[in-house]
Image (cartoon, rainbow, N blue to C red):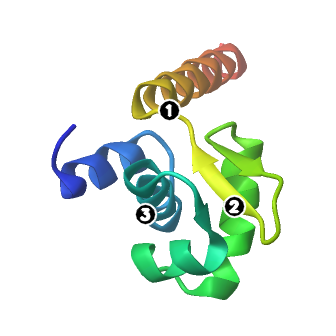
Amino acid sequence: MDNSEDCLHILCELGLSISQAKIYLSLVKHKDLKAQEIASISGVARPYVYGILVQLEEAGLVEKIISKPEEFHAITIEKCIHTLIQKRVVKTAELQQKAL
């Protein structure tokens, strides 16, 4: 994926919110960043960045680097897409099971 708008759209279609996608893509493009830097680059307000980073970390898309201050690192876009597709497959199977 080479276009940022296309990347945002695809990540949102795979289940991320627009803010989650912006933060994730900021980390992919700039490697290791502090929360303040992420807010500045992504355009997501700093108070929201912390909560979204926790969500992305729980989803396995972002890793926290132990440092002072903390920095964050994103998994590769390929691994991210694979992870999100796998989650969608599982959710679809669960919904299919409930429907039947």
Nearer-N-terminus badge (2/3): 3
Helix, strand or loop under label 1: helix
Q: Distance between the residues labelled 3 and 1?
A: 14 Å
Q: Residue furthest toward the front?
A: 68
Q: Residue drawn at (69%, 40%), measured in percent from left and top? A: 59
Q: Is residue 14 left or right of residue 5?
A: right
* Above or below 53: residue 3: above
Label annotation for residue 22: 3
Q: Residues within 10 Å of mark 3 (few under 14, many from 20)?
A: many
Amino acid bearing label 3: Lys
Q: Which residue lies furthest to the left in this view?
A: 3
Q: Which residue corresponds to mark 2?
A: 71
Give the residue at x 16% y 50%.
3
Q: Which mark is residue 68?
A: none
The residue at which mark 1 appears reads as: 80
Q: In this view, does 33 lie above or below 15?
A: below
The vertical placement of 88 against 67, above or below, is above
Mark 2 and mark 3 residues within 8 Å of each other at the beta carbon: no
